Amino acid sequence: MTVLVVGGGLSGLSTAMFMALHGAPPLLIERHPTTSVHPKARGQFPHVMEALRVAGVDEQVTAASPPDGEFRIIRAVSLNGPVLQEIMTESPDFSALSQAPWANVSQERMEPILVDRARELGADLRFNTELVSFEQHENGITARLRNLATGEEEETEVDYLVAADGHRSPIREKLGIELIGRGVLGEGTGTLFEADLGHRQVLCYLLNSDLPGGAGVLVSTDVPGRYAVGVSSTDSPKDWVQIIRTATGIPDLEPKVLDLPHGRSQTTHGVAERFSEGRIHLVGDAARLMPPTGAFGGNTAIMDGFHLAWKLAMVTRGEAGPGLLASHDPERRPYSKIIADQQLLLFSQRGRPDLADDPALPKPVQPVSALFFGCRQLGGAIIADPGDPGDLWEDPAQPTGRPGVRAPYVKLRNGSTTDLLGRGFVLLTGYHAYRDIIAKIEVHVLDEPEFFRAYGISPEGATLVRPDFVIAWRSRGFAPEELEKAWRAVLDWQA
Ligand SMILES: Cc1cc2nc3c(=O)[nH]c(=O)nc-3n(C[C@H](O)[C@H](O)[C@H](O)COP(=O)(O)OP(=O)(O)OC[C@H]3O[C@@H](n4cnc5c(N)ncnc54)[C@H](O)[C@@H]3O)c2cc1C
C-alpha cells in the first residue's frame, strides 16, 4: 500500500520521517525547489523534542539551536523601549515533566534536518513536484503530479493521501472542508534584515503609531545579527529602512534589508470542520490556522505527523485495520481547537487590545503545562476507563495515567519511562506474568513506586502505551485477556 504526502513543510516532512521510521516510507512531493528559505516558525517544545528523539534527530536540533541566552518576549513601542509589558523572560521550567530540553531552531534550519532523516530512513522526497489534481475513489486516490523543472506530468495511484499543503490547502479547499473559527484577524507584510543589535534573542510585539498599521513584530532569527520585522499593513511598504529604524528605536541604524521576497501573511483563526475525508487526512496548517502567539503552529505541525504516522504505517503494512485512520479526526481536532483558542487568547492579550475584552474569548487553560503534556486524545483509538468523565486535559503535575493522556514521565533507576517509548506498542507493568502474552508488544517490568503512583496501577496491573506516547489502555490488576481484547480493539478501531 502506498501513501502520498503533499507538502514538504514541517507537517509533511514529520509525517514522512515518522512513517519511514515505522517501516512504511511514503512518497512526499513539494512544489518548491528547496525547503523554506524563510525562518518562519521558531522553537521546539520539550514534548516535540521527545518525539524528535524517537527519530534520532534531537541532538542535531539542539546543536542547530542558537547558543543559550536570554530570550525575552516583550510588548514595546520599539525594541529599545519603552517596554509596555514583559511577557516572558525565560522558557517555563518543565524539568519535572520531561527530560527533553527546549530548542530554538527556525523552520529554515529544522526542515533540512527532517529531510535528511526521512531520506535516510527510505522516504522518497521529490521537490519541484506539484500535485496538479486528485480524484478519490472507492479503492484509492488517483493523483496527477507535475515535475516543475521539466513540465512532465504523471498519474499515480495511491492508497492514502496526506494533505500537508499549508494554510491555503488546495486539497482542503477541493474537498469543501470549511475552517470553523474567527476567520482572518489581520494581514501583514514583513522582511528579513541584518544589523548589529547586540545579538539579542527577542520577540517584540510593537505598538507604535509611526509603523504602517500602527503595530508590528520584530523577532530575532537563529542567525546572529539577522532579524525579521513585520507590520500590520496590506500595502507593501516602500521604505523598509525607516520601518526598521522605528521598530528598533535606533534612528541612525543602517540595516541590510535582505533580498528575499517580502512575505505577506494573514493571521487567521480556524479549525477544519473535519480532519479526514475517506482516505485523505489533513495535518499542520491544512488542518488548523491560528495566530502565531504561543508558537504552537510549527510544533503542532510536527506532532500531527508523529501522531498520524504510526497509524498510516500499521495500516499500510497490514498490521491494523483501515478504521484506525478514522481516529485521526476525533483525536487531533478537539486538541487543535483548544490550542487554536489559546493562541487566539494570547493574540488578543499581546497584540489586539480591541479583542481583549471580548466575553466570547476562551478562558486560559491552567496550568499552562497542560497544553504541552496534559491534553487527552479521547474519542479515538483508546479504551477509556469505565466511567471516564471525558475531560480534555489534566494537570500533568498530578498525573492520573488515564487512557488518552500522554504517558507520564517518571525517572527510573536507569533512565525514565520516556526512554522506553516511541518505536512500537509498549506495555509498562510491575508483573512478570505479562511477558510474552502478545509477541508484538514490548514489555517492561518496573518496580519503582513513583511509576505505579503516576500511572494509577498496582504492581499486578499494566498500562499499554501507543507509539505516540498516548496511553491506550490500562488495568489496575492482572488482566491478560483484557489486554488482548484492548490491543485488538485499538488496531481494529472503527469510528
Ligand atoms: C512568516 C511566518 C512566520 C511564522 N512564524 C511562526 C512562529 O514563530 N511560530 C509558529 O509556531 N508558527 C509560525 N508560523 C506558522 C508555521 O510556519 C506553520 O504553522 C507551519 O509551517 C505549518 O507547517 P505545514 O507543514 O503545515 O505548512 P507549510 O510549512 O506551509 O508547508 C506546506 C507546504 O506545502 C506545499 N504545497 C502546497 N500545495 C502544494 C501542491 N499542490 N503540491 C506540492 N506542494 C504543495 C507548499 O509549497 C509548502 O511548502 C509562521 C508562518 C509564517 C508564514
Image (tube, helix red, strand yellow):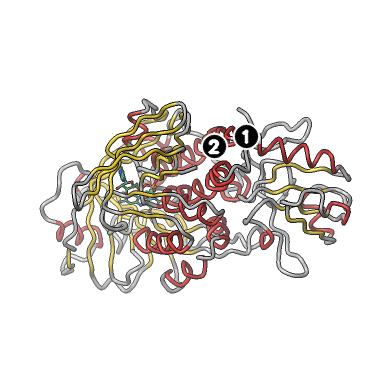
Give the x, y percent position of residue 248: 25, 62
Give the x, y percent position of residue 234: 19, 41
Q: Quadrant of residue 178?
A: top left
Q: Nearer the viewer, residue 188 or 282?
A: 282
> Residue at the spot x=47%, y=37% of the render?
341
Counting residues from the start of the chain, the first of labels 2 and 1 encountered is 2
Q: Is residue 297 left or right of residue 192?
A: right
Which mark, residue 380? Answer: 1
Q: Label 2 to label 1, Cα distance in Å?
A: 7 Å
Amino acid identity at mark 2:
His
Give the x, y percent position of residue 475: 82, 43
Q: Are marks 2 and 1 in contact (CB under 8 Å)?
A: yes
Classify mark 2 as within 8 Å of ligand 1 or not, answering yes or no.
no
Which mark, residue 328? Answer: 2
> Residue at the spot x=50%, y=65% of the render?
57
Q: Nearer the viewer, residue 455 or 74?
A: 455
Give the x, y percent position of residue 315: 57, 41
SS class, disc 1? loop
> Residue at the spot x=85%, y=56% of the render?
430
- Placement of 440 over or under 418, stated as above or below: above
SS class, disc 2? helix
> Residue at the spot x=40%, y=47% of the render?
350
Q: Is residue 490 left or right of residue 236?
A: right
Q: Is residue 76 left or right of residue 451?
A: left
Task: Work out which quarter of the rendered image holds the C terminus and state it.
Answer: top right
Q: Nearer the viewer, residue 448 or 152?
A: 152
Q: Is residue 6 left or right of residue 152?
A: right
Q: Quadrant of residue 221?
A: bottom left
Q: Quadrant of residue 289?
A: top left
Mark 1: few/some/many CA within 10 Å (<14, 14-19, 20+): many
